[in-house]
Image: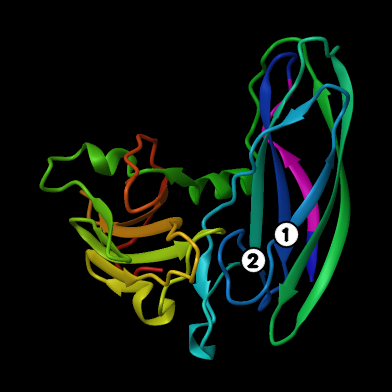
Amino acid sequence: MVNFSLVADGLPIPSGTFTLGLRYKIAKGWHTYWDGLNDTGMPASWQLELPDGWTAGEAQWPAPVRYGIENGVVDHVYMDEATILIPITVPTSTQPGEANIRVSSKWLVCEEACIPEKGDATLTVKVVAELQASVVPEAIAKSRGRAITRGWGELSQQAPTLAPTTKLEEAVLHVHVPGATKLAFFPGRGSSPAEDLIADGETEGNTLRIPMHQRTGEPLTVCGVIEVTRMSKNKTLQTSWHSFDFTPETPVVSESKTESTSKPATKPE
């Protein structure tokens, strides 16, 4: 149900970094899972086999979509296609020429039933001595268009009365984004769960209020992604995704570049 393959965004150079994409092409009607807090399912896992001295950075998962609400669960999934981006650094000692990257991956793909699958893929990349222009594969470009960025980015650079706020008070997560038409919360892996994510995890408007559940004997930890849909200056709806990780005593304020997608002002996703 899933076709697994590898793509890269350019020609590697010694002491340089390029992006490796783990592409999962998903059959129509089926879905795989985000690396966050889900009621069912599990995210993809993988093992990289890189040339000697090459190193992999932190994987960048594209933003998922909420799924399964009508069945009484909340999952965060990918449909049609998902490409996970991994920065790969090439050591200075690498000589120009071809190099092979191999990846073995496992994933769970579901429709009415779930099927565990696995696959292996190999990508041959050409190392060149100097940086050269290249075309970014469509799969990587799409994934970057749904990038999850740290903090509020450009939204936080607006006037104080227009800047978003996120706070955790008495085990309730409060999110306010002036100008937003829709907000949703995707709890991250390791987050305390919401009391009722089906009812409270998504709202039409600019304010989200989510009571969180603190397990007995465990600290209250809230992390995850806020999906923001808002009207742009050119009257189109834009969606962006912002991650945070904090305790009640330590709210996060971070600067980042915001990735967003634009679409006609008809209906939020």
Q: Are marks 1 and 2 in contact (CB under 8 Å)?
A: yes
* 232 left or right, relative to 130: left
Label 1: element kind: loop
Amino acid, disc 1? Ala
Q: Position of residue 18 (x, y in %)?
A: 67, 28
- Between residues 244 and 222, which one lies in front from this camera angle? 222
Above or below 61: residue 44: below
Q: Which residues are magenta?
A: 4-12
Q: Relative to residue 125, is residue 135 drawn left or right?
A: left
Q: What residue is drawn where x is 41% and y is 80%?
A: 196
Position above or below: 135 against 35: above
Q: Residue 154: which quarter of the image?
A: top left
Front residue of 78 and 237 = 78
| Quadrant occupied by the N terminus | bottom right
Q: Can you tell which mark lies on residue 44?
A: 1
* Left or right, residue 85 beside residue 124: left
Q: Is any atom of residue 236 visible in this view? A: no
Question: Which color scheme is applied?
Answer: rainbow
Q: Which residue is mark 2?
A: 33
Residue 183 appears at what percent x and percent y?
32, 65
Furthest residue toward left? 161
What's under tag 2, amino acid-wise?
Tyr
